[in-house]
Amino acid sequence: LGPVAGRITSLGTIIGGVGLKLAALTVGFAAVTFAIRAAVGTISRAEVQFNKLNAILRATGRTAGLTLNEIEDLSRQIGIQTLASTQKVRDAAGILLTFKSIQGDTFREALRLTQDLAAVGFGDVKTGAIQLGKALEEPIVGLGALRRVGVSFTEEQKELIKSLANTGQKAKAQEIILGALNTQVGGAGVSAAQGLAGAVDTLSEKFTIFIEKSKSGAFFVRMLTGAIEGLADMFGDARMEATKFNS
């Protein structure tokens, strides 16, 4: 305990020398700096994701039939209603967009089901997007992948899916796959977000979305920047006072 006591004594001497005001300013300075970095990081990550989604939409010829705003609204909705973050749902949406046959309502339902799969233990939303995307893009091959992760289909369903896929009726085959998934895991993501865990997650998601919005986020960053500049000025004044005190 001797070395520990020595360090504590040294810290007390330093604090006594510079004064409690400077110590408080130091803590405030560090806290605001951390907040600014977190806000800027959140906004920049969102910008990266939006740019990536835009690029995928252009590359795929917008075959999904959804705009960036529609995908963003859906991602936020899923992020708020479940324990998945909006950021991860955006990534899952980007994966699903690469499967060109997944379109319209099928895309919306598939994206929701990725979190339902994650909620019952089938990996995370990105893993679910890959597995479900493959199954919907190539129903015959994809059925095997879904079965390997625990999603079951009756023999009648499997035969019907194969028949529809072989006769060029992929959209109907996709409906059967999504229907089977809904009977097994549908709503699991929303149910898992009930109670305290869901309330805390919803608060976090809404705050993150608030920061991400261009106008609000920019204002928030400007406000924090002004605050840290003010603290910097106070820090300088307090340092001058400490110098006078020591002299």
Image (cartoon, rainbow, N blue to C red):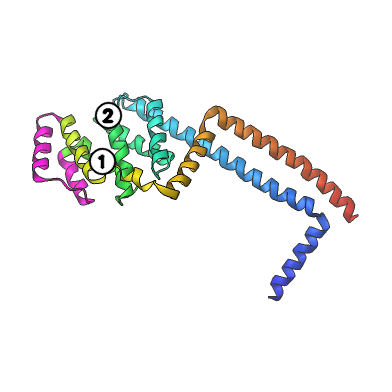
Which residue sits at x=35%, y=43%?
190
The answer, for residue 89, to whether it is visible in the render is: yes
Between discs 2 and 1, the one toward the N terminus: 2
**Amino acid on which the number 1 mark rests in the picture:** Leu
Residue 62: percent from left, percent from top: 32, 24
Q: Is residue 232 left or right of residue 191?
A: right
Mark 1: secondary structure: helix
Q: Residue furthest right?
A: 247
| Residue 148 part of the magenta-drawn span | yes
**Magenta-tinted stretch:** 140-169
Residue 136: percent from left, percent from top: 22, 36
- Marker disc for residue 132: 1
Instruction: Give 200 or 15, whichever is nearer the viewer.
Output: 200
Residue 243: percent from left, percent from top: 86, 51
Q: Quadrant of the C terminus?
A: bottom right
Which residue sits at x=77%, y=40%?
233
- Marker disc for residue 105: 2
Q: Is residue 76 left or right of residue 207?
A: left
Residue 106 figure quarter: top left
